[in-house]
Amino acid sequence: MTDLRDSTRLHDVARRAALEVRDPLLAAFRTTIAVDYKVDLHDVVTEHDKRSEETITKFIMREVPDSMLLGEEGGSVGSGAVQWYVDPIDGTSNFARGLSFWCVSIAAVIEGEIVAGVVYDPVADNLFSADLNGAYLNGRSIRSNAVPDERRATLITGYPVARDFRLDGKQRALEDIGVLIETFSTVRRPGSAALSISHVAAGWVDAAVGFGVNPWDVTAAILILKQARGSYTPLTLGKVASSSKDYLCPGYVALGEGANYPTLNRIAENISQRRQETSASSSLSVARA
Ligand code: IPD
Ligand code: CA
Ligand code: CA
């Protein structure tokens, strides 16, 4: 069990680390930014992602030397009792093009428990955060708040992207998103998992769902949402064991307090189930080969 003072201190370190990269990122935003591609043309990175991660890493390792840090760009650094997850820019495609929906995401975990999280949107100057005492927006307490009926609710998701077409089949994926579009009052694709979940936490949107996230995308936002009395249901999608920590799972359904969305739950569960079956049958054919 983490001491509350540790949680408060790590929350403060995460907040200051995020603010360290505020000015350079704002200075670069909406200038001409060179883009590199990682896995494919849908997976972009810029020099600013790398530079920001270096700044954040140096800051955190100096403040809390007893740390192991996993960043999206630089991989794993250090060893120690505090595990950090850092996404220097979540929503890089938006950042690189000039759309103002991106953020810095930093989380601290001790013995498998998320104890501090910061999601910072420099353009709006919104700092969502949480420690073991509560969830905050710019230092003031927040509480999620969702409309009870999905037919009147707003859902945000990145689903489906090209990778989901490959995993789920294009027809199937388009049918599933079609059902969500018909069911919900509004469906939007803003493009940053961390900021999307933080919007649910702040009560600015009712629900978010994702099917291809990493720990650096969601760990900070999970604590923010839970401390704002929202719910976070992880989806294993056949990629991790069912006993895995929620922040290590590649999928999620994030709901504001008061939401009861059977269609969303059913579609998310179906996608997860199908991917589990696909992954089980492909491991079987590997074993047979
Ligand atoms: C991506 C964004 C996107 C989510 C992807 C992430 P990046 O992160 O959060 O919304 O759907 O799963 O990889 O590449 O912009 O840091
Ligand atoms: Ca990300
Ligand atoms: Ca990123």
Image (cartoon, rainbow, N blue to C red):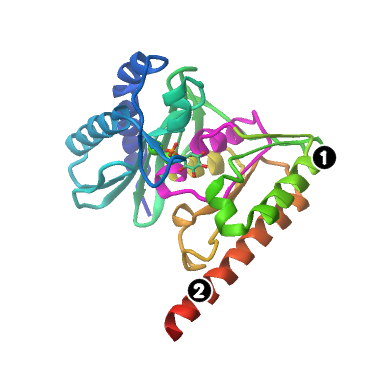
Instruction: Provide residue 150's location: percent of width, then percent of height.
Output: 78, 42
Q: Residue at x 69, y 54 (%)?
A: 171
Q: Secondary structure at mark 2?
A: helix
Q: Quadrant of the N terminus?
A: bottom left
Say which quadrant the C terminus sits in: bottom left
Which amino acid type corresponds to the residue marked 2 in the rendered image? Ser
Q: Which residue is mark 2?
A: 282
Instruction: Report if the beta carbon of the residue with label 2 is closer than 8 angstroms to ligand 1.
Output: no
Q: Is residue 199 magenta?
A: yes
x and y, in percent, of residue 210 in the image: 57, 47
Q: Magenta segment range? A: 190-218
Residue 87 spot, x, y in % from top left: 37, 38
Residue 254 appears in the figure: yes
Is residue 149 in view? no
Q: Which of the two residues, 25 or 289, is positioned nearer the viewer here?
A: 289
User: Residue at point 72% right, 51% down?
Assistant: 176
Residue 66 vs residue 245: left or right? left
Residue 272, relative to residue 76: is it above or below? below
Label 1: which residue?
151
Could you tell me residue 266's position as x and y percent? 73, 57
- SS assignment at label 1: helix
What residue sits 46% from the left and 52% below the top?
247
Q: Mark 2 vs mark 1: which is more N-terminal?
A: 1
